Image (tube, rainbow, N blue to C red):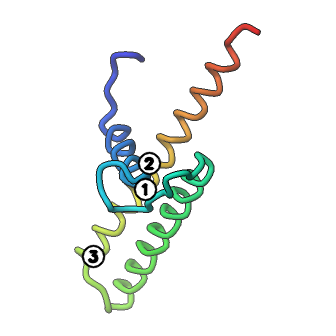
């Protein structure tokens, strides 16, 4: 799979870079000495918060108090957050499998 480019993964890595403080002030900024675990925790918390916000906007729309554009935007943000989490998970699993294949 070395030559396959996945646009969702590219977007996910771009968002993860923003969350790590590289490339912008958007998202969850990590402290300069933050560990990888802290970064993962921040990404997961951000994904959960984004999903909850999308659910809240959808609920408000169902009650007639929301706007469809806001709901679509919130759902897209939640989807991007989920793609970020999945892309990071896939890379961590791939790295773990590489380490396990190394000879001792």
Upstream in the sequence, badge 1 or badge 3? 3
Pointer 1: what residue? 81
Q: Is residue 59 left or right of residue 36?
A: left
User: Which quadrant: the C terminus?
Assistant: top right
Q: CA distance from mark 2 to mark 3?
A: 21 Å
Task: Find numbered disc 3 in the image and state the secondary structure of the residue it sits on.
Answer: helix
Task: Find numbered disc 1 in the image and state the secondary structure of the residue it sits on.
Answer: helix
Residue at 58%, 35% in the rendered image: 92
Circles 2 and 1: CB atoms closer than 8 Å = yes
Farthest front residue in view? 33
- Viewer-side label of 1, 3: 1
Which sits in the foreground, 24 or 79? Answer: 24
Which sits in the foreground, 31 or 15? Answer: 31
Pointer 2: what residue? 84
Circles 2 and 3: CB atoms closer than 8 Å = no
Point out residue 39 in the picture as x, y percentages from the top left corner: 54, 52
Q: Is residue 2 left or right of residue 86?
A: left
Q: CA distance from mark 1 to mark 3?
A: 16 Å
Q: Quadrant of residue 97?
A: top right
Q: Is residue 65 above or below residue 100?
A: below
Q: Is residue 83 left or right of residue 100?
A: left
Q: Is residue 9 left or right of residue 33?
A: left
Q: Quadrant of residue 63?
A: bottom left
Q: CA distance from mark 2 to mark 1?
A: 5 Å
Which sits in the foreground, 47 or 68? Answer: 47
Upstream in the sequence, badge 2 or badge 3? 3
Number of other residues with Cα within 10 Å of mark 3, as a class: few under 14, some 14 to 19, many 20 or more: some
Pointer 3: what residue? 70
């Amino acid at each position: 799979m070395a030559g396959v480019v996945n646009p969702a993964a590219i977007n996910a890595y771009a968002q993860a870079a923003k969350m790590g403080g590289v490339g912008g002030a958007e998202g969850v900024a990590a402290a300069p000495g933050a560990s990888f675990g802290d970064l993962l925790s921040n990404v997961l918390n951000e994904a959960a918060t984004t999903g909850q916000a999308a659910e809240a906007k959808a609920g408000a729309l169902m009650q007639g108090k929301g706007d469809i554009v806001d709901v679509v935007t919130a759902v897209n943000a939640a989807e991007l957050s989920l793609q970020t989490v999945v892309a990071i998970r896939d890379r961590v699993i791939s790295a773990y499998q590489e380490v396990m294949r190394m000879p001792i």
